[in-house]
Image: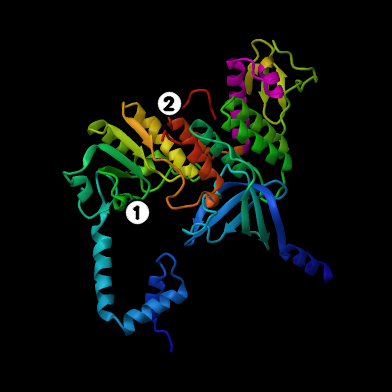
Amino acid sequence: MIAPCAAWDTAMKTERVELHPAYILHHHPYRNSSRLLEVFSRDYGRFGMIARGVSSKRSRLQGRLQPFRPLLLSWHSRGELATMRTAEPDGAPPVLSGAALMSGFYLNELLLRLTGRHVPYPRLFRNYHRTLNRLGERRAGQDALRLFECHLLQELGYGMTLDHEVEHGRPIQPEAHYCYHIERGPVELATGEPANGVQLAGSSLLALASGQFPDQQSRKDALRLMRTVLAFYLGSKPLRSRELFRSLKGVNRGTTL
Amino acid sequence: MAVTPLLSRLVDGLRCLPGVGPKSAQRMAYHLLERDRESARRLAAILALAADKIGHCKSCRTLSETDICPLCASGSRDRTQLCVVEMPADVEAIEQSGSYRGLYFVLMGHLSPLDGVGPEDIGLDQLKERCRAEEVREVILATNPTVEGEATAHYISEQVKDHGIRVTRIAHGVPLGGELEYVDGDTLSHAFSGRREW
């Protein structure tokens, strides 16, 4: 009889966390002056948090509780929903505007759709932080997105094989052509053979593995590959941030989600 | 005192107002019934009338009981300037400041990529049409300084620029009468990057 009680006790125990690094992925107004936040924290993963009274005129936190801003959050939780106590800025936020801002929404949507609640992903958290900063610096935003997607899949346990082909385990040759099968990996493509996967050059696979994209062709191939692989894990529901990005003509210079 | 069904329906009805919980709703109900029945009748009549008659202005989308709201119909406004805001309350705020003489366009929300609120939900086709058909020379983006507001402003600017229209964004900075010490860091950095010749 002791065990169930003890389990219940642990589950309902109030947990207090002080000034822990976190980002807000998404937020909704709640009641009169409160907000419901979906938080991505370094050691506690993604979870819901209520921030009371922060939308009132007097609250100084209103401007601070925005997505893409590094924060130090204090909260206590008992059960599923945590209650925020304080929020401090944790360094300067990346300056995201235009296409970079849209890319930021895309990252958040990927995290919301693919990560489980209450699963810690400390390495992914640091990678998210780095990716946002790269987007803010406006250098190679598209490359940063591809690397984040790769890393995300790896952290989720769907890591991709990019450095050797899976039939014989031979290293990828830059000049050879491959067909990438989802959940399996690249297979060398013999000429004339029909292939039901993503076809791309070995150099593009190696570029994605190293994070260094030498030309536009490797970027295009990486985009095609990552889009197909992500679609497999995302299921039939489309990514809304990507749809919005596509409907916006004109900014599609240099960055593609 | 036992609460009669009609009274409890009134209390429930009042709870639809923002910030009104069971206790305040009860207080309001008792006040209207015990002390001010005349106001209660007036309120009921005007609520019914407003709910039926008030729609959206066909030109700027703000709340209005006429097809074109008085502001859009006015002959004394500058028709070359169009200010884009998120909510009708924002129009009120800008009007009260008395610093703007142009016309408005009210989005009734903002783009929210993660909630699936797209351009068609905030009337951007109508905005583009206005920019094309009317004599608009400047679009002033006065969406909120939140990430969603910024995304909306960016989206609109990309759509409108093609029409050869000047696009401006309202400045973000230190509130008047405030002390720098208490201004949050993000606002201060915006204020610095947006500084002007003096």
Estimate the x, y position of residue B5 in percent, counting from the top left.
39, 81
- Left or right: residue A240 versus residue B36 is right
Which residue is under mark 1? B89
Residue A160 in which image quadrant = top right
Looking at numbered disc 2 in the image, what kind of residue is underneath it? Answer: Gly
- The chain carrying label 1 is B
Q: Nearer the viewer, mark 1 or mark 2?
A: 1
Residue B14, above or below A80: below
Q: Tell me: A214 left or right of B190.
A: right
Q: Residue furthest bottom?
A: B1
Is A227 located above or below residue A112 in the figure? above
Main SS of residues in magenta:
helix
Asked whether residue A208 appears in the rendered view, the answer is yes
The one nearer the camera, B174 or B103, is B174
Q: Position of residue A148 (x, y in %)?
A: 65, 32
- Which chain's residue wears label 2? A
- For this orientation, the residue located farthest to the front is B198
Q: Is residue A1 positioned above or below A116 on the image?
A: below
| Residue at the (66%, 29%) spot, across then down | A147
The residue under the point 47% across, 43% down is B148
Q: Which residue is mark 2?
A: A250
Residue B107 percent location from the top left of the image: 35, 45
Q: Amino acid at mark 1?
A: Ala
Region rendered in magenta: A204-233
Instruction: Tell me if residue A224 is in the magenta stretch.
Output: yes
